[in-house]
Amino acid sequence: MAEACYIGIDTSNYTTSVAVADASGRVIANLKSPLPVKVGERGLRQSDAVFAHTKNLPGLLDRLGEVLQDYTPVAVGVSARPRDAADSYMPCFLSGLVAAHAMAAERRLPIYEFSHQNGHIMAALYGSGAPEDLRQRPFGAFHVSGGTTEMVYVTPTVAGFDVSLCGEGLDLHAGQAVDRIGVAMGLSFPAGPALELLAMQNDKPIPPVRVSVKDGSCHLSGLENLALKLYAETEDKPLVAAFVLRFLTDTLHKMALHLRERYPTLPLVFAGGVMSNRLIAAELRRRLPGEVYFSEPAFSADNAAGIALLCRAAAEK
């Protein structure tokens, strides 16, 4: 009999994702298709995201079928909401829900619903090489992306995580700031990868950075204004990119210090698309003592691998 496997589906506002985990907890497929954004635009409306997922899913599911030739699916997992909160809802996740329920019904498989955030946390644990026992003890997690800037206290459960908010972005999210500034400088959306490459080219002193963090929460709207002012004055894209990344690094560092004041030995896990940035990760790793984990980009940016792994945990509990 073919080996059992677990399917994960995630339809965020950036990427259509499908993944498969085997019975041992190894991710054997991590398939993605980005949502198309027109040049000069800074993202998609929810209605456009749903339409894009509808176009992307058939091709991804065809590729999934090729993977499943050597495996027997035993459960389907899907991201049903952004976070585990009563008011957490985004229409784009309906696309994945429909596909997952159709697949589960056709194959007569159980289906498990999770939050997009918990999928990110699980994927980051997997992709960072964090020790297995970290999934049995509390840790702090940063979810930093285009739609979220959150610092949470995580308590692992049998089939996932309970999270409590310890800090958040109070206006602009980190990924939004990156994309808005990048697009203003002529970069394509999402602008993160190109901004990182530009920052690596900078050879000039970065202007002083003063971040706004209070009680673990941050304001990032000032970053957009400061960066665009610097660009207008200098027209120096590498310098502006380096300034943006330094501002975000300093902000996340100050948030992490706040959490460590409350929990001095708490392990920290960083997840989300912004945390794919190698410059931010390297600097935070240098500054923060103790256990600090960063995932490789494939499991930090939007993906369904974490959902597939959560599905495995839920099915086996």
Image (cartoon, rainbow, N blue to C red):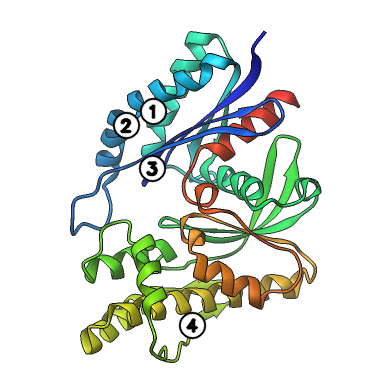
Amino acid at circle 2: Asn
Measured as percent of width and height from the top left, residue 221 is found at 37, 74
Question: Mark 1 sits on what residue?
Answer: 60
With respect to residue 303, does 152 lie above or below? Answer: below
Q: Earlier in the sequence, mark 4 or mark 1?
A: 1
Question: Mark 2 sits on what residue?
Answer: 56
Q: CA distance from mark 4 to mark 2?
A: 39 Å
Q: Nearer the viewer, mark 4 or mark 2?
A: 2
Q: CA distance from mark 1 to mark 2?
A: 6 Å
At 58% from the left and 40% from the top, the residue drawn is 306
| Residue 15 tag number | 3
Give the mark count.
Answer: 4
Q: CA distance from mark 2 to mark 3?
A: 9 Å
* Secondary structure type for disc 3: strand
Instruction: Identify the image quadrant of the N terminus.
Output: top right
Q: Earlier in the sequence, mark 4 or mark 2?
A: 2
| Residue 88 tag number | none
- Contact check, label 1 and label 2, Cβ < 8 Å: yes
- Contact check, label 3 and label 4, Cβ < 8 Å: no
Considering depth in this image, is 36 or 264 the residue closer to the camera? 36
Dividing the picture into quadrants, the one containing residue 2 is top right
* Secondary structure type for disc 4: loop
With respect to residue 82, does 223 lie above or below? Answer: below
* Secondary structure type for disc 1: helix
Q: CA distance from mark 1 to mark 3?
A: 11 Å
| Residue 211 tag number | 4
